Image (cartoon, rainbow, N blue to C red):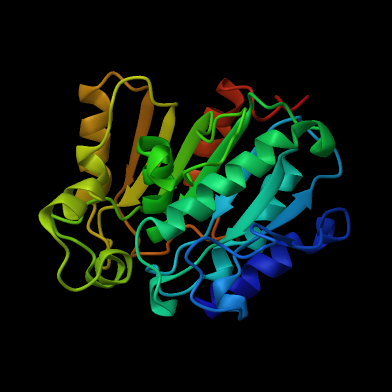
Protein backbone atom coordinates (compact mmCIF):
# COMPACT_ATOMS: atom_id res chain seq x y z
CA UNK A 1 0.00 0.00 0.00
CA UNK A 2 2.82 2.46 0.78
CA UNK A 3 4.19 2.14 -2.76
CA UNK A 4 0.74 2.87 -4.17
CA UNK A 5 0.42 5.96 -2.00
CA UNK A 6 3.82 7.23 -3.16
CA UNK A 7 2.77 6.70 -6.78
CA UNK A 8 -0.48 8.48 -6.05
CA UNK A 9 1.22 11.53 -4.62
CA UNK A 10 3.56 11.73 -7.62
CA UNK A 11 0.57 11.47 -9.94
CA UNK A 12 -1.17 14.33 -8.10
CA UNK A 13 1.76 16.76 -7.97
CA UNK A 14 1.06 18.61 -11.25
CA UNK A 15 -2.18 20.01 -9.88
CA UNK A 16 -1.86 19.77 -6.09
CA UNK A 17 -1.34 23.54 -5.87
CA UNK A 18 -4.67 24.15 -7.62
CA UNK A 19 -6.78 22.33 -5.02
CA UNK A 20 -6.34 22.24 -1.28
CA UNK A 21 -8.23 21.28 1.84
CA UNK A 22 -10.20 23.88 3.72
CA UNK A 23 -10.19 23.91 7.51
CA UNK A 24 -12.06 20.85 8.87
CA UNK A 25 -15.60 21.54 10.04
CA UNK A 26 -16.65 20.06 13.37
CA UNK A 27 -19.93 18.29 12.65
CA UNK A 28 -21.30 18.77 16.14
CA UNK A 29 -19.89 22.00 17.69
CA UNK A 30 -21.66 21.29 20.98
CA UNK A 31 -20.62 17.63 21.02
CA UNK A 32 -22.03 14.65 19.15
CA UNK A 33 -25.10 12.92 20.54
CA UNK A 34 -23.86 10.03 22.68
CA UNK A 35 -20.24 11.22 22.65
CA UNK A 36 -18.03 9.14 24.94
CA UNK A 37 -15.44 11.87 25.49
CA UNK A 38 -13.96 15.06 24.07
CA UNK A 39 -10.80 13.81 22.38
CA UNK A 40 -10.35 13.91 18.58
CA UNK A 41 -11.75 10.36 18.26
CA UNK A 42 -15.05 11.66 19.69
CA UNK A 43 -15.29 14.65 17.33
CA UNK A 44 -16.29 13.77 13.75
CA UNK A 45 -15.27 16.28 11.10
CA UNK A 46 -15.98 17.22 7.51
CA UNK A 47 -13.08 18.55 5.42
CA UNK A 48 -13.98 20.47 2.23
CA UNK A 49 -11.83 20.33 -0.90
CA UNK A 50 -12.66 22.96 -3.50
CA UNK A 51 -11.86 22.46 -7.19
CA UNK A 52 -10.10 25.05 -9.33
CA UNK A 53 -13.05 24.91 -11.73
CA UNK A 54 -16.35 23.62 -10.36
CA UNK A 55 -18.90 21.54 -12.27
CA UNK A 56 -21.45 22.47 -9.61
CA UNK A 57 -21.63 18.87 -8.35
CA UNK A 58 -20.36 17.65 -4.99
CA UNK A 59 -19.30 14.39 -3.36
CA UNK A 60 -19.30 13.25 0.26
CA UNK A 61 -16.23 11.01 0.47
CA UNK A 62 -16.16 8.28 3.15
CA UNK A 63 -12.87 6.37 3.61
CA UNK A 64 -12.81 2.80 4.88
CA UNK A 65 -10.87 1.18 7.68
CA UNK A 66 -13.04 -1.69 9.01
CA UNK A 67 -14.90 0.76 11.28
CA UNK A 68 -11.76 0.64 13.43
CA UNK A 69 -9.75 3.39 11.71
CA UNK A 70 -9.78 5.89 8.87
CA UNK A 71 -7.63 4.80 5.92
CA UNK A 72 -6.18 8.10 4.72
CA UNK A 73 -5.18 6.64 1.34
CA UNK A 74 -8.90 6.75 0.49
CA UNK A 75 -9.34 10.33 1.69
CA UNK A 76 -7.30 13.26 0.37
CA UNK A 77 -5.86 11.52 -2.75
CA UNK A 78 -9.37 10.82 -4.01
CA UNK A 79 -10.67 14.22 -2.95
CA UNK A 80 -7.99 15.82 -5.11
CA UNK A 81 -8.70 13.46 -8.01
CA UNK A 82 -12.40 14.34 -7.88
CA UNK A 83 -11.45 18.03 -7.65
CA UNK A 84 -9.54 17.63 -10.90
CA UNK A 85 -12.83 16.62 -12.53
CA UNK A 86 -14.72 19.61 -11.14
CA UNK A 87 -16.37 18.13 -8.05
CA UNK A 88 -16.43 19.86 -4.70
CA UNK A 89 -15.53 17.17 -2.16
CA UNK A 90 -16.18 16.77 1.55
CA UNK A 91 -14.16 14.11 3.39
CA UNK A 92 -15.95 12.62 6.39
CA UNK A 93 -13.95 11.38 9.37
CA UNK A 94 -16.57 9.61 11.42
CA UNK A 95 -16.73 8.00 14.85
CA UNK A 96 -15.36 4.46 15.04
CA UNK A 97 -16.07 1.18 16.72
CA UNK A 98 -12.51 1.11 18.06
CA UNK A 99 -13.42 4.21 20.10
CA UNK A 100 -16.51 2.50 21.50
CA UNK A 101 -19.12 3.71 19.01
CA UNK A 102 -21.70 1.30 17.61
CA UNK A 103 -24.40 1.63 14.99
CA UNK A 104 -25.98 4.09 14.31
CA UNK A 105 -23.34 6.58 15.54
CA UNK A 106 -21.41 6.34 12.26
CA UNK A 107 -24.62 6.84 10.28
CA UNK A 108 -25.54 9.83 12.43
CA UNK A 109 -22.26 11.43 11.35
CA UNK A 110 -22.93 10.68 7.67
CA UNK A 111 -26.49 12.03 7.87
CA UNK A 112 -25.31 15.20 9.60
CA UNK A 113 -22.64 15.62 6.93
CA UNK A 114 -25.31 15.44 4.21
CA UNK A 115 -27.50 17.92 6.08
CA UNK A 116 -24.63 20.38 6.28
CA UNK A 117 -23.51 19.95 2.66
CA UNK A 118 -27.00 20.24 1.14
CA UNK A 119 -28.14 22.86 3.62
CA UNK A 120 -25.17 25.06 2.70
CA UNK A 121 -25.20 24.38 -1.04
CA UNK A 122 -25.39 28.08 -1.87
CA UNK A 123 -22.38 28.85 0.33
CA UNK A 124 -20.31 26.14 -1.40
CA UNK A 125 -21.67 27.11 -4.85
CA UNK A 126 -22.96 23.63 -5.55
CA UNK A 127 -26.22 22.26 -6.93
CA UNK A 128 -28.28 20.84 -4.05
CA UNK A 129 -29.65 18.21 -6.46
CA UNK A 130 -26.20 16.99 -7.53
CA UNK A 131 -24.68 15.74 -4.28
CA UNK A 132 -23.32 12.20 -4.33
CA UNK A 133 -21.58 9.97 -1.83
CA UNK A 134 -18.59 7.67 -2.37
CA UNK A 135 -17.15 5.11 0.04
CA UNK A 136 -14.53 2.37 0.19
CA UNK A 137 -14.77 -0.97 2.00
CA UNK A 138 -16.40 -0.27 5.40
CA UNK A 139 -16.94 3.25 4.09
CA UNK A 140 -18.90 1.60 1.29
CA UNK A 141 -21.07 -0.05 3.93
CA UNK A 142 -21.68 3.34 5.52
CA UNK A 143 -22.66 4.67 2.09
CA UNK A 144 -25.14 1.82 1.67
CA UNK A 145 -26.76 2.51 5.05
CA UNK A 146 -26.92 6.21 4.20
CA UNK A 147 -28.94 5.54 1.06
CA UNK A 148 -30.94 2.61 2.49
CA UNK A 149 -31.83 3.84 5.97
CA UNK A 150 -30.92 7.50 6.56
CA UNK A 151 -33.74 7.64 9.09
CA UNK A 152 -31.64 5.48 11.45
CA UNK A 153 -29.10 8.29 11.63
CA UNK A 154 -31.51 11.16 12.19
CA UNK A 155 -31.42 12.67 15.67
CA UNK A 156 -34.87 12.96 17.20
CA UNK A 157 -35.99 16.55 17.53
CA UNK A 158 -33.75 17.91 14.79
CA UNK A 159 -35.68 20.11 12.37
CA UNK A 160 -34.17 19.93 8.88
CA UNK A 161 -35.72 21.20 5.66
CA UNK A 162 -33.43 19.20 3.33
CA UNK A 163 -33.04 15.48 2.67
CA UNK A 164 -29.97 13.58 3.89
CA UNK A 165 -30.24 11.04 1.06
CA UNK A 166 -27.62 11.64 -1.67
CA UNK A 167 -28.46 11.91 -5.37
CA UNK A 168 -26.17 9.02 -6.35
CA UNK A 169 -23.84 6.59 -4.62
CA UNK A 170 -20.49 4.98 -5.41
CA UNK A 171 -19.45 1.84 -3.50
CA UNK A 172 -15.88 0.62 -3.93
CA UNK A 173 -15.25 -3.02 -2.83
CA UNK A 174 -17.88 -2.49 -0.13
CA UNK A 175 -18.68 -4.40 3.02
CA UNK A 176 -22.40 -5.14 2.67
CA UNK A 177 -23.64 -8.17 4.58
CA UNK A 178 -23.40 -8.97 8.27
CA UNK A 179 -24.84 -12.44 7.51
CA UNK A 180 -23.26 -13.80 4.31
CA UNK A 181 -19.47 -14.11 4.54
CA UNK A 182 -19.29 -11.10 6.86
CA UNK A 183 -16.08 -9.14 7.31
CA UNK A 184 -15.38 -10.00 10.94
CA UNK A 185 -13.66 -6.80 12.04
CA UNK A 186 -16.21 -4.48 10.42
CA UNK A 187 -19.07 -6.46 11.94
CA UNK A 188 -17.55 -6.45 15.42
CA UNK A 189 -16.67 -2.76 15.32
CA UNK A 190 -20.13 -1.78 14.04
CA UNK A 191 -22.54 -3.98 15.99
CA UNK A 192 -20.44 -5.69 18.67
CA UNK A 193 -19.65 -9.30 19.55
CA UNK A 194 -23.17 -10.52 20.29
CA UNK A 195 -25.68 -8.42 18.35
CA UNK A 196 -29.33 -9.40 18.30
CA UNK A 197 -30.91 -10.64 15.08
CA UNK A 198 -32.74 -7.38 14.45
CA UNK A 199 -29.58 -5.25 14.31
CA UNK A 200 -27.78 -7.89 12.23
CA UNK A 201 -30.52 -7.71 9.60
CA UNK A 202 -30.82 -3.94 9.89
CA UNK A 203 -27.12 -3.52 9.06
CA UNK A 204 -27.06 -6.16 6.32
CA UNK A 205 -27.56 -3.72 3.48
CA UNK A 206 -28.66 -6.28 0.91
CA UNK A 207 -31.79 -6.76 3.03
CA UNK A 208 -32.59 -3.06 3.31
CA UNK A 209 -32.84 -1.98 -0.33
CA UNK A 210 -36.16 -0.51 -1.43
CA UNK A 211 -37.54 1.03 -4.64
CA UNK A 212 -36.75 4.69 -5.21
CA UNK A 213 -33.13 4.70 -4.07
CA UNK A 214 -30.66 6.89 -6.01
CA UNK A 215 -28.50 5.44 -8.82
CA UNK A 216 -25.59 3.30 -7.64
CA UNK A 217 -22.17 2.48 -9.10
CA UNK A 218 -20.37 -0.39 -7.38
CA UNK A 219 -17.25 -2.36 -8.14
CA UNK A 220 -15.22 -5.19 -6.66
CA UNK A 221 -12.46 -7.60 -7.64
CA UNK A 222 -12.95 -11.35 -7.86
CA UNK A 223 -9.67 -11.99 -6.04
CA UNK A 224 -10.49 -9.84 -2.98
CA UNK A 225 -9.39 -11.91 0.03
CA UNK A 226 -10.59 -9.49 2.72
CA UNK A 227 -14.14 -8.62 1.66
CA UNK A 228 -15.57 -11.33 -0.63
CA UNK A 229 -16.98 -10.27 -3.98
CA UNK A 230 -20.32 -11.73 -2.92
CA UNK A 231 -20.93 -8.53 -0.93
CA UNK A 232 -21.12 -6.41 -4.07
CA UNK A 233 -23.07 -9.11 -5.89
CA UNK A 234 -25.66 -9.37 -3.12
CA UNK A 235 -26.19 -5.64 -3.11
CA UNK A 236 -26.43 -5.45 -6.91
CA UNK A 237 -29.00 -8.26 -6.89
CA UNK A 238 -31.09 -6.38 -4.32
CA UNK A 239 -30.87 -3.17 -6.37
CA UNK A 240 -31.98 -5.10 -9.47
CA UNK A 241 -34.89 -6.73 -7.65
CA UNK A 242 -36.11 -3.32 -6.49
CA UNK A 243 -35.70 -1.54 -9.81
CA UNK A 244 -32.91 0.77 -8.61
CA UNK A 245 -30.65 2.04 -11.45
CA UNK A 246 -27.14 0.69 -10.97
CA UNK A 247 -23.95 -0.54 -12.57
CA UNK A 248 -21.89 -3.42 -11.18
CA UNK A 249 -18.27 -3.74 -12.34
CA UNK A 250 -16.39 -6.91 -11.42
CA UNK A 251 -12.69 -6.97 -12.25
CA UNK A 252 -10.86 -10.28 -12.37
CA UNK A 253 -7.55 -9.34 -10.77
CA UNK A 254 -6.69 -7.45 -7.62
CA UNK A 255 -6.92 -7.93 -3.89
CA UNK A 256 -8.67 -5.64 -1.41
CA UNK A 257 -7.61 -2.03 -1.93
CA UNK A 258 -6.80 -2.46 -5.61
CA UNK A 259 -7.47 0.66 -7.63
CA UNK A 260 -5.93 3.35 -5.45
CA UNK A 261 -4.67 6.59 -6.93
CA UNK A 262 -1.67 5.97 -9.18
CA UNK A 263 -2.60 2.44 -10.25
CA UNK A 264 -4.31 3.36 -13.56
CA UNK A 265 -7.00 0.80 -12.79
CA UNK A 266 -9.90 0.67 -15.31
CA UNK A 267 -12.46 1.58 -12.65
CA UNK A 268 -11.39 5.23 -12.85
CA UNK A 269 -12.49 5.55 -16.49
CA UNK A 270 -15.63 3.48 -15.89
CA UNK A 271 -16.68 5.73 -13.00
CA UNK A 272 -16.03 8.95 -14.92
CA UNK A 273 -18.12 7.67 -17.83
CA UNK A 274 -20.96 6.93 -15.38
CA UNK A 275 -20.65 10.29 -13.62
CA UNK A 276 -20.80 12.12 -16.97
CA UNK A 277 -24.01 10.29 -17.75
CA UNK A 278 -25.51 11.63 -14.53
CA UNK A 279 -24.34 15.19 -15.07
CA UNK A 280 -21.73 15.19 -12.31
CA UNK A 281 -18.69 15.52 -14.58
CA UNK A 282 -18.51 17.69 -17.65
CA UNK A 283 -17.67 16.15 -21.01
CA UNK A 284 -14.09 16.87 -21.96
CA UNK A 285 -13.65 19.06 -25.02
CA UNK A 286 -11.41 17.55 -27.70
| Residue positioned most to the front | 157
Question: Residue 75: x, y in percent?
Answer: 60, 62
Quarter placement of the C terminus: top right
- Residue 257 placement: quadrant: bottom left
124 lies left or right of 162:
right
Which one is in front, 136 or 1?
A: 136
Which one is in front, 173 or 259?
A: 173
Which one is in front, 63 or 233?
A: 63
Question: Residue 207: x, y in percent?
Answer: 19, 39
15 lies left or right of 33:
right
- Residue 129 placement: quadrant: top right
Q: Identify the residue at horizontal 44%, vertical 26% (top origin).
A: 214
- Residue 26 placement: quadrant: bottom right
Is residue 164 at all visible to an observer of this figure?
yes
Question: Residue 130: x, y in percent?
Answer: 64, 27
Q: Identify the residue at horizontal 17%, vertical 64% (top origin).
A: 195
Which one is in front, 282 or 76?
A: 76
Q: Identify the residue at horizontal 78%, vertical 24% (top origin).
A: 285
273 lies left or right of 56:
left
Classify 278 as above or below 165: above
Q: How many discs mark residues in the rendered view?
A: 0
Question: Residue 209: x, y in percent?
Answer: 27, 32
Is residue 286 at all visible to an observer of this figure?
no
Amino acid sequence: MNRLLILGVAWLLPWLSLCAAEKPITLWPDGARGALGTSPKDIPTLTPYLPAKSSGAAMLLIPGGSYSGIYEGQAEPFALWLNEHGLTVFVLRYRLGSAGYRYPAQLQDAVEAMFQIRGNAEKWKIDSKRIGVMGFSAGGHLVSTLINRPEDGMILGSDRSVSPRPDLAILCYPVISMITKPHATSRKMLIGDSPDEKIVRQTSSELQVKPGLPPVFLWHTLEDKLVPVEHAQLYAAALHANGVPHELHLYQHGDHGTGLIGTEHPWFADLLFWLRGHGFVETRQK
